Every structure is written in C-alpha cells, then in structure tokens.
C-alpha cells in the first residue's frame, strides 16, 4: 500500500509518499502562488490542483513506486481559503486566501448582527474576523453577487481538491469550524448565518468525519497519475490536528505548538464545556465526539524572519545561534511581538510590536534575542490561558522551522516552565494524515494502534529555573499592560512557586 499525503499549506504545497508502515519514501514541494493587491490575496485553484498532481508524479518517480500497489491520496493543510465552483466543479473566480482582508467591514456587520459571545458559542471561534469564509461570502453578496448566485459549490481549498479528484463535494469535520458558517456543538451548518451571508445550503459540501474515504479518483484524473493498482481519496483532516497525530501528541495534556510562520496551539480537551470567557476556539476532533481547543497567534516565527531579513540585514541562522549561546542575556531589551496587532490570548486590536528598555549598547544579537524571547513569552501567555480554562498541560510538543534552533527550544522551555519535546519528524502533518489513511484502509485498527509504526526520535528540553527568567516575564507582562492595557491576569507555570 502507498499513501500520498498532500499538504495544502499556506506557503508551500507538499506531497509526501509513505508505505503501509508510515515510513517516508519520498517528498516533493512547490510554492503556493498568490496575486496580491492591497487587502486582496487570491490564488488560482486549478493551478493548485495541477501542482498537486505534478508533485504526486514526482514523488512516485523519486521513490520508484510499485505500479501494482494500491494507492491512497489523503489531504491535509490550510482550512479557510475559499473557492466557488460551477456545476462541473470548475472554479468560477480566483480563490480567496485566508490572508485576504477585504471583508473587514463585513466581519463587523456579522458581529453587530449576531454578537461576539453568541456567535462564539455556535461557531467555536472567539470573534468574527476577515479570515473566515463567512465574511468573504457576505462581501461577495454585496460586491460580486453574480459570482455568488452562479456558485453551485461553496468550498474551501481542501474541499475543492477533493471535488476535482473524486467528483464528490465533501468537507471533513475538523475544518468546518474555520468557516464561521458551522454550528460546532450541533455538528451542522448554521442556517441563520447562511442566510445573512447569502449562501444557499445546497451549495455547501456534505460534512464527513476526519479520515473518511471519499471515493476513487475520477478516470480523467487517474489517467494523469503514476501507474497503480487503484487510487482512492481520503478526506484527511486539518494540518494542525494531523501534526498532533504525526508527533504522537494527540491526547489530553500535550499541547502541540507550531514553530513556523505563526504560533498555533492545539490540545485535545480532557473534559470540555463551553465557557464564554475562554480565549480558546473549539473544534471537532479526529474521533467522534472529541473537542480540540485551538489558538493561533500570527506573530510567531514571522517576527524573527521580519527582524532577521528586514532589520538585521539577513543575519544568518548559524551566526545567530552561535552568538546567542555565548552571551548573557539578562540585560537584553524586551520585545512585544504584536507586529500584526491582535494576538491571543489578549485580542487587543490596539497592540503593536515594540522594543522596550532599548539602549545604545544593544546590538542586533541583543535585539534578535529579545524577538525570540518575546515569542516565547507569547507562547507562555497562551499556555497560561489553556490552564485557566481548566486543561492540564504536561508538555509542549513543537514542530516547524523554528525548532532548528536549539537555543530557542530551550528558551521556550525555560520561559514556560514545561518540558518542550521536539520530534525529529519533519513532515508531521503529512505523517498524521498518512496514519488516518492507514486506519481507513484497515492497516491500523484506530489512531491509537500505532505500536508497529516507527516512532520518530525526539529531543526533550527540560526547563531551567532562574529568577531572571521569571523577572523578565513580569517586565514583559507589565510593559504590555502599560502600553496597551487589558493584559490578562498573570499566572505562573507549574514549578514556579505557586
């Protein structure tokens, strides 16, 4: 059996080929391309499909894939990007990326009509923002009504690729809460929101559980794929939740934290009930009846990239890592990583990025440390929010480009006061998607039946207790409160003298 795990990422499209033991055989990648014009960020959905098919062919060639093996294609990746298609399944207009911000006014209209708290209880999302497809659909109703009226399918990007591969319009459940159109507790679309956004219910895809086999590949697409005994397509799940499965962190007490462009945290809720005061969104999990808590801060690794490339003149990672290891940082400046404004758990729209206590003696290494520490402080604030919600946290499991820095991994452990586990698996989301496909194919009895699969190596960073670490976080918390107000009440990580 062969599993082609397709990751429809925001930055890159990726296909990783696995065997029936979840061993990686080959991997290929291509950039996700956009057209940007001010607040508008669009993409060519058909070009995405073509790129995915080419990546599958490249993977098969690289691995010399057996032509008589049964092949499964399973999808993971981004959720919110919107595609409208006609009755033949062809895109009616360019896809609208989740990064597109044209619908800010419509997001405000939705909040005014439904109320933030009331909508939170239904959608699982703490607030209406231009990210959600619902806001874009209301924009289309006002500005491009002919496109919305002609739509036979209202889909997200993963739904669209599933439609083109199988001829079936389906959307798997873990991504539905990212539409702002879905009643998460009721596990159904929200009729009142559909009406407000001008969406006909029959245009929305059928909702299926994570890891559902959608069907065989349609003949015209199968003819373009490498030889195989057969091809079937699996709906997969959201990339963040697949990454949890791929790093063996899908379970209560383990917070999965991405160390990529954004800082995204996921946690399987141990005993969850809705709390309107919570700052965590909630979503259907990989198994029936499960709830996964989720938080996403835009100012993650992008903050370091902004500083390294835009301010420090392309400071190399190797030089930075070496200099960081050699210095004492107790007198470094502080950095508030709010370059994009709003970040959970504070959701302060007035917040901005800022260096604090900057002096003439500080150089680019001191500032780089401040940026990295600022992201670690933001991680701690989110961990505190999870604990405030009554969820235990025993470890942070992290994957992504930022984990290449051993210094940063240790800094996060120190600041949060929790073990940070960094699996060696570089394709965590694709591995998790492959496990879902193996379960659906009967190779595994459940997502817990992974004993015979190879376990990725991991390095664990244990927190080091230091008074200066706690003092610097207190100063960060105070600076955030003084500059922008509304900071959350501080709590201390376990082991810090509660």
Image: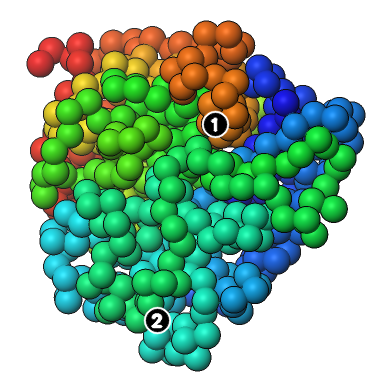
Q: Residue at x 22, y 72 (%)?
A: 192
Residue 56: which quarter of the image? top right
Q: Nearer the viewer, residue 388 or 269?
A: 269
Callout 1 crowding tier (Cα within 10 Å): few <14, some 14–19, many ≥20: many
Q: Is residue 378 visible?
A: no
Q: Nearer the viewer, residue 147 or 164?
A: 164
In the rendered view, would you say 320 is above or below 146?
A: above
Q: Residue at x 17, y 54 (%)?
A: 121
In the rendered view, would you say 53 is above or below 100?
A: above
Horizontal and vertical percent for residue 205?
46, 62
- At numbered mark 1, what does the secondary structure look like: helix, strand or loop? helix
Q: Nearer the viewer, residue 104 or 244?
A: 244
Q: Is residue 466 visible?
A: yes
Q: Residue at x 11, y 44 (%)?
A: 275
Residue position marked by numbered label 2 in the rendering: 139
Q: Nearer the viewer, residue 262 or 469?
A: 262
Q: CA distance from mark 2 to mark 1?
A: 38 Å
In the rendered view, would you say 198 is above or below 126?
A: below
Horizontal and vertical percent for residue 23?
69, 19
On the rendered structure, is 57 left or right of 13?
Answer: right
Residue 45: which quarter of the image? bottom right
- Colour scheme employed for the rendering of this structure: rainbow
Callout 2 crowding tier (Cα within 10 Å): few <14, some 14–19, many ≥20: many
Residue position marked by numbered label 1 in the rendering: 440
Horizontal and vertical percent for residue 162?
60, 54
């Amino acid at each position: 059996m062969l599993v082609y795990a397709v990751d429809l990422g925001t930055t890159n499209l990726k296909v990783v080929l696995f065997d029936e033991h979840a061993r990686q055989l080959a991997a290929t990648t291509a950039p996700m391309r956009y057209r940007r014009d001010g607040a508008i960020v669009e993409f060519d959905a058909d070009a995405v499909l073509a790129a995915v098919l080419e990546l599958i062919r490249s993977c098969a060639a690289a691995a010399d894939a057996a032509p008589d093996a049964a092949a499964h294609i399973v999808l993971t990746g981004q959720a919110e990007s919107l595609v409208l298609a006609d009755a033949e399944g062809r895109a009616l207009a360019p896809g609208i990326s989740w990064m597109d911000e044209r619908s800010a006014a419509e997001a405000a209209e939705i909040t005014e009509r439904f109320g933030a708290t009331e909508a939170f209880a239904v959608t699982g999302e703490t607030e209406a923002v231009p990210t959600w497809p619902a806001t874009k659909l209301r924009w289309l109703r006002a500005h491009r009504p002919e496109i919305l009226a002609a739509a036979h399918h209202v889909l997200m990007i993963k739904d669209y690729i599933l439609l083109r591969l199988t001829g079936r319009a389906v959307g798997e459940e873990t991504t539905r809460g990212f539409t702002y159109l879905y009643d998460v507790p009721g596990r159904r679309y929200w009729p009142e929101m559909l009406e407000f956004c001008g969406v006909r219910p029959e245009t929305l895809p059928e909702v299926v559980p994570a890891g559902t086999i959608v069907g065989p590949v349609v003949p015209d697409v199968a003819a373009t794929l490498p030889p195989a005994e057969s091809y079937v397509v699996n709906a997969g799940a959201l990339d963040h939740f697949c990454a949890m499965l791929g790093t063996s962190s899908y379970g209560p007490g383990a917070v999965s934290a991405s160390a990529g462009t954004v800082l995204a945290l996921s946690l399987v809720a141990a005993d969850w009930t809705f709390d309107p005061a919570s700052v965590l969104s909630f979503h259907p999990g990989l198994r029936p009846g499960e709830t996964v808590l989720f938080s996403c801060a835009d100012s993650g690794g992008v903050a370091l990239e902004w500083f390294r490339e835009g301010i420090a003149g392309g400071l190399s990672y190797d030089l930075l890592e070496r200099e960081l290891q050699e210095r004492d940082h107790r007198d470094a400046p502080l950095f508030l990583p709010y370059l994009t404004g709003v970040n959970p758990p504070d959701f302060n729209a007035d917040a901005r990025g800022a260096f604090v206590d900057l002096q003439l003696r500080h150089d680019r290494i001191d500032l780089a440390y401040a940026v990295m520490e600022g992201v670690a402080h933001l991680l701690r604030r989110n961990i505190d929010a999870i604990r405030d919600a009554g969820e235990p946290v025993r470890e942070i499991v992290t994957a992504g480009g930022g984990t290449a820095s051993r210094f940063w991994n240790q800094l996060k452990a120190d600041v949060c006061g929790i073990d940070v586990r960094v699996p060696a698996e570089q394709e965590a989301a694709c591995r998790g998607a492959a496990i879902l496909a193996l379960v659906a194919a009967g190779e595994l009895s459940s997502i817990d039946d992974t004993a015979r699969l190879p376990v990725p190596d991991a390095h664990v960073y244990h927190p080091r207790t230091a008074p200066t670490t706690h003092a610097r976080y207190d100063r960060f918390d105070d600076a955030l409160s003084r500059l922008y107000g509304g900071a959350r009440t501080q709590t201390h990580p376990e082991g810090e003298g509660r």
